[in-house]
Amino acid sequence: MSTALIAALASLAGGCRSTVVLFDGDGKDLDHFSTFLVDTRHEDPRGVFSVVDGELRISGEGLGYLATRRSFRDYRLVVEYRWGDRNHGERAGKARDSGIFLHARGPHGNSFDGGGAFMAAIECQVMEGCVGDLMLIRGRGEDGEWLPLRLTTDVGEERDAAGWPYWRPDGEPFTLERWGRINWRAKDRAWQDRLGFRGARDPDSPAREWTRIECVCRGDRILIRVNGELVVTARDVHPTSGKILLQCEGSEIFFRRVVVERLP
C-alpha cells in the first residue's frame, strides 16, 4: 500500500459531522445495546453485561456479545478498554481475549465460531499480543447460506504457525474471503496463547492501564490504530456496514468509552 493511500485513510479520522456516544465515563445503562449469550440468548441471568462505577463491564462468563441496536456506515469508532482480573472456562491460564466486531450482519448467534455465539463480521481482535489483528468471522444468514465476507490488504512473505500473513504496507496484495486472519504489522512472531503475554512491540497498554483503539471505516476501507499507532489497513472490504459488537469470550474486560463519529 502506498504512503499516499495510508495518509488518505488516516485523514478520514477528521472532518466528522456527528457523534453517537454509545457509552462513556458517565454511562449508567446499556440502552444503545442488545445482549446475546450462546446459552441464554437475550437473557443475562449471570449479569455478564453490567455498568460498574461508570464503566461497562463484560465479565467473560460465557460466549456472546453486546450488539448496537442500529447499523453504521462510514464512521470512526473509538473504544477505550482495560482488562479485568479473571479468565473463565477454556480461557483460564490463556491470553485475555475479547474483540470489536465491525459490519456485523445476519441474525443473532449466526457464527460458525463458538457454535453460534457471535455474528458474521470483520473483527478487530482484542487479545493479549494480538490487539489489532483483522479477522473474518464466518456466519450464516436467515436462509442458511454463508454470508459473504471479504477484504484485501498488503502482506509480507512471512506466515504465522497457522499459515496467516502479517500486514506490510509495501507488501503484495492478499485477499481473505469468508474467514481468516491478517496479523497486525509488528505482532510478536513467537506469540503464545498464555495469560499475560506481551510482545516486544505491542502498542496496547500494559497491565490494567487503558488502551485506545480507533477503527476508521469509510466506504470499502478499514484502518486500525492502537494507542495512536497504525497497525493494519484493509480495502475492498465487504460488507461496508452493519452493527458493532463488543465480544464476550472468556475474559473480564472493562470499557470507559465507546463512541461512533460519523464521517462525511
Image (spheres, grey):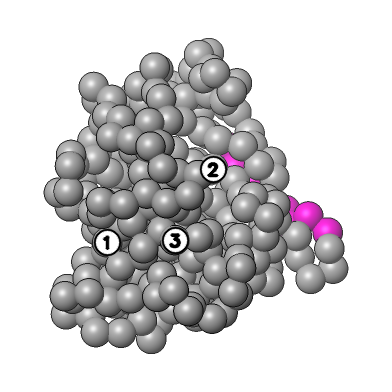
Direction from residue 121 to residue 194 in the image, left or right:
left
Image quarter in which the N terminus is found? top left
Badges 3 and 2: C-beta atoms under 8 Å apart? no
> What residue appears at the point 51 percent right and 19 percent down from the top-left corner?
160
Direction from residue 2 to residue 203 in the image, left or right:
left
**Magenta span covers which residues?**
145-152
Read off the residue under disc 3: 61
Q: Secondary structure at mark 3?
A: loop
Q: Position of residue 154 (x, y in %)?
A: 51, 28
Residue type indicated by callout 1 = Phe
> What residue appears at the point 38 percent right and 31 percent down from the top-left corner?
194
Label 1 vs label 3, nearer the camera = 3
> What residue appears at the point 47 percent right and 24 percent down from the top-left corner?
166
Q: Toward which corner of the image does residue 115 lie, by quadrant?
A: bottom right
Direction from residue 184 to residue 165 in the image, left or right:
right
The reply to whether residue 167 is visible in this rendering is no
Read off the residue under disc 1: 254
